Every structure is written in C-alpha cells, then in structure tokens.
Image (cartoon, grey):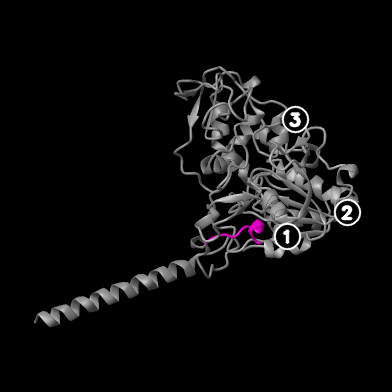
C-alpha cells in the first residue's frame, strides 16, 4: 500500500514538473517582439554583450592608426561579461585601448563633459584628461562639430556613448555632427552600440523642420525606439547630413539584445538621470523644461518629481525645494518651495505620459507664465502647446500623432539591427 502511494506521489511530482516546463516553454514561445513576431528565446535572461566588449570585432580596425574617441563616463568595457546586464567591474574604453597599445591621440566629449559631471547646457572647456594626459576637445557650446584642424592627423574615430533613446537628449545631435565632420574629412567612424533603455516603444510628435535645434535635429518622434547604432544608420540612409553626404560607418552590434530586453544602466548617462526610474520618466517629464515647473534638478530625485511655486498646493500637497548640487549649480526655482508630485514609486508604463503636463497646466495659478519659448523646441511642434491650452485630453492629442508614427516606424524598420 505504501509502495503504491509512493509511486502515485512520484508520478504526480513528475507530471507537475513536466507541466511547469511546458508552461514556461509556451510563455517564452508566445512572447512577441514589437513587430508582432514570435520571440523564440528569452533573451532577457542572458547577458547582453555591448559593442565595446567585442574588442575582437574592432581592434583590427584600429591597429597602426591614429585614433580619436568620442566618449564620456559611460564609454566602458565590462570585465565580467557573464554577469547579467554587464553590471560587473569595468575599465574606461580609452584606458583599455591605451593598454592594448592602440594609438589614441585625442578625446572628444559631449554635453556634461568627458567625466559627465557638468550642468545641462553648461559650456565645456577644452583641456587635458588628468589620468591619461590626452587632449580633450569639447563638442558642446560653441564647438558642436569637430573642426577640420581638430581631426587633422586622425585615421579613424570611435563613438561610444550611452544614449537613452529620446530626441531631445543631445548625444544623438553630437552623433550627427561627428558623422558630418567624418564624412567631410573622409574619416571612417566606428559605433560601439549600447542598449536603449527606452527602446521598447515609439511615441511622440514628429519634429517639424522649423523647430529644429540641438535638442531635436531630425524628423523623428520624441521616443524613437532605436539604439545609437541604428540611429547612425538612419542618419546615413536618410541622407540627413549636410549636402546629403554619407559617413563611412561601421556599427559593432550587441549580442543578446532585443528592443524588448530590459536593461538597467550600470552607469548614469548624465548627472540628472541617476537611476532607472528617472530614465523611464525622462521622455514624459522633460517637457517641463519648457515651462516654469521644476523636474527636480537640485534635489536627489531628478526627473522623478515635478513642481512649481505656481502650482495649486491644495491639488499638489507634495513639495520640495531645489538647491545647488552636482549637475545643477543653479537649478530652476532654486530656494523656492515647489508644489507638485512625487513619482519615485510610480510604475512607468511604455509610452509618453502627457497627463502630468496636462494636470500641471490645469492647476497652475498663472497660465500666462506656464510655457516658455523652449517648449516648442522640446516638443518639436507648435501644436502640442496649443492642444494643451485648448483643453484636449491625452487620448485626443495622441490621436493626432498616430499616422505619422506609423509612417516613421516603416522608415525605422529599414535600419533596425535587433528584433
């Protein structure tokens, strides 16, 4: 009797295990990419190997050449490749290349500088890197595009910067000017690709040409859903460089990455995007930079809170006071009590959330002071401000983007490197 019971128990356990395995297999099998195709394996459980770690694919292109590097604090090679999402120890790309006897001659740095500590919009001065002694040339402020004299003597350029997949995040504007300078000087460019933490969706209005600026240069939506390598291919393919030039481009692609793969950035990409929550909220909250509402610069919750002295405190009981800190020496609304909302614990859904902006405008005590001229540059269109002022809902506003987003996705598909 006991033997029979034991056999039955073992049989039940085996059946349960088999059912779980089938269930897990079906769960992976039924997952789909953003294009609706089945995902054959669960890449989210594997380590992503970024382009910089694949030295075997680009060192041969650098040997016996004079090399320039466009990079910042995120330009690193991870030592522990097997650890999930490459969150192991790392060395800076420049240090690694020098240790491998690659002849790095100079470094070009974007907004926030080579070490990534400067304020947003702060002019970065040329100088020398304290660790390596290499000359650093700023690509922000008056010198956004490498000059012919600054490229003289270089045989090849490497671009390795962690982006966040948003049109007004200026690293992709730096990419445009670097590609343009390389095309004009006939210097090949190597892109070491990295994940887009907001790469799982495409959303926002398409930039109108009359609103082009350094915070938006191309006719793309706010969240473009592309890696920096894919975006470089689009710039080339759509002939967006001056006079329709094209850059000689090599993209070192990632391994085990898809646009649906979750990726937590091991190094903050800029001083005011300190964590995953701020990066996820950035596409929605950056609109406030074109208003009198603070997004938490000057606090330890940058791009995770918003508020203003002009917002109705009965509707927005949460408050904070911005004070100078790293990356925000003179933050908006410095020293003033700002009433608003704390989003640090909010579960961020894919897509741009306009409800925060609509709610703030509806409950400001002075609507005439709410928007400033920078808002249209960020939005890339005059329509969004008018729609909010006219009381349109988020659903109504997004309906006006739908067709142009579908058209953009068709163009984007031509340049995608990952499912």
At mark 1, the secondary structure is strand
**First in residue order: circle 3 vs circle 1:** 3
Q: Quadrant of the C terminus?
A: bottom right
Task: Determine which residue is flagged by label 2.
Answer: 245
Judged by its main secondary structure, the magenta piece is: loop
Q: Quadrant of residue 280?
A: top right
What is the x, y in percent for residue 418? Answer: 64, 62
Query: 300 or 341, which lies in front?
Result: 300
What is the x, y in percent for residue 194? Answer: 64, 54
What is the x, y in percent for residue 304? Answer: 52, 35
Task: Determine which residue is flagged by label 1.
Answer: 251
Q: Quick check: marks 3 and 2 in contact, CB under 8 Å?
A: no
**First in residue order: circle 3 vs circle 2:** 3
Q: Quick check: marks 1 and 2 in contact, CB under 8 Å?
A: no
Task: Give the mark toward the camera: 3 or 2.
Answer: 3
Q: Is residue 21 above or below residue 101?
A: below
Q: Is residue 49 magenta?
A: yes
Residue that appears at 43% across and 70% down: 26
Task: Determine which residue is flagged by label 3.
Answer: 123
Q: Which mark is residue 213?
A: none
Residue that appears at 64% across and 52% down: 225
Q: Label 1 vs label 2: CA separation?
A: 18 Å
Task: Answer with left or right where residue 113 lies relative to residue 313.
Answer: right
Stretch in magenta: 47-54
Q: Is residue 405 above or below residue 368?
A: below
For residue 408, say whether it is visible. no
Q: Quadrant of the N terminus?
A: bottom left
Q: Label 3 vs label 1: CA separation?
A: 30 Å
Q: Quadrant of residue 250?
A: bottom right
Residue that appears at 64% across and 27% down: 291
Q: Is residue 401 above or below residue 252?
A: above
Q: Is residue 194 magenta?
A: no
């Amino acid at each position: 009797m006991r033997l029979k019971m034991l056999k039955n128990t073992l049989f039940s356990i085996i059946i349960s295990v088999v059912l779980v395995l089938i269930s897990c297999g079906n769960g992976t099998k039924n997952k789909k990419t953003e294009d609706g195709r089945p995902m054959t394996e669960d890449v989210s459980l594997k380590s992503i190997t970024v382009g910089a770690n694949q030295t075997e694919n680009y060192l041969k292109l650098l040997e016996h050449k004079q090399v320039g590097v466009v990079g910042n604090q995120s330009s690193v090679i991870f030592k522990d490749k097997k650890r999930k999402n490459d969150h192991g120890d790392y060395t800076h790309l420049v240090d690694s290349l020098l240790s491998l006897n690659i002849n790095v001659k100079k470094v070009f740095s974007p907004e926030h500088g080579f070490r990534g500590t400067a304020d947003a919009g702060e002019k970065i001065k040329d100088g020398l890197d304290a660790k390596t002694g290499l000359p650093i040339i700023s690509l922000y402020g008056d010198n956004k595009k490498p000059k012919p004299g600054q490229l003289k003597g270089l045989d090849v350029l490497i671009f390795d910067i962690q982006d966040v997949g948003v049109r007004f995040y200026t690293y992709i504007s730096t990419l445009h000017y670097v590609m343009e300078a390389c095309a004009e000087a006939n210097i090949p460019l190597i892109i070491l690709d990295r994940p887009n933490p907001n790469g799982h969706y495409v959303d926002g209005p398409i930039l109108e040409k009359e609103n082009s600026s350094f915070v938006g240069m191309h006719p793309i939506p706010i969240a473009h859903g592309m890696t920096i390598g894919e975006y470089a291919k689009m710039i080339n393919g759509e002939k967006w460089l001056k006079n329709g030039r094209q850059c000689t481009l090599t993209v070192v692609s990632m391994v085990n990455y898809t646009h649906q793969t979750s990726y937590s950035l091991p190094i903050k990409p800029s001083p005011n995007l300190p964590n995953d929550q701020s990066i996820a909220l950035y596409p929605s909250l950056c609109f406030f930079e074109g208003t009198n509402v603070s997004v938490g610069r000057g606090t330890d919750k940058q791009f995770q809170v918003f508020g203003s002295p002009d917002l109705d405190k009965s509707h927005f009981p949460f408050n904070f006071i911005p004070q100078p800190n790293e990356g925000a020496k003179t933050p908006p609304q410095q020293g003033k009590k700002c009433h608003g909302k704390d989003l640090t614990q909010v579960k961020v859904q894919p897509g741009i959330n306009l409800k925060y902006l609509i709610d703030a405008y509806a409950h400001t005590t002075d609507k005439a002071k709410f928007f400033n001229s920078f808002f249209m540059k960020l939005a890339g269109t005059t329509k969004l401000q008018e729609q909010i002022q006219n009381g349109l809902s988020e659903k109504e506003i997004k309906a006006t983007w739908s067709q142009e987003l579908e058209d953009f996705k068709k163009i984007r598909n031509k340049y995608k490197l990952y499912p």
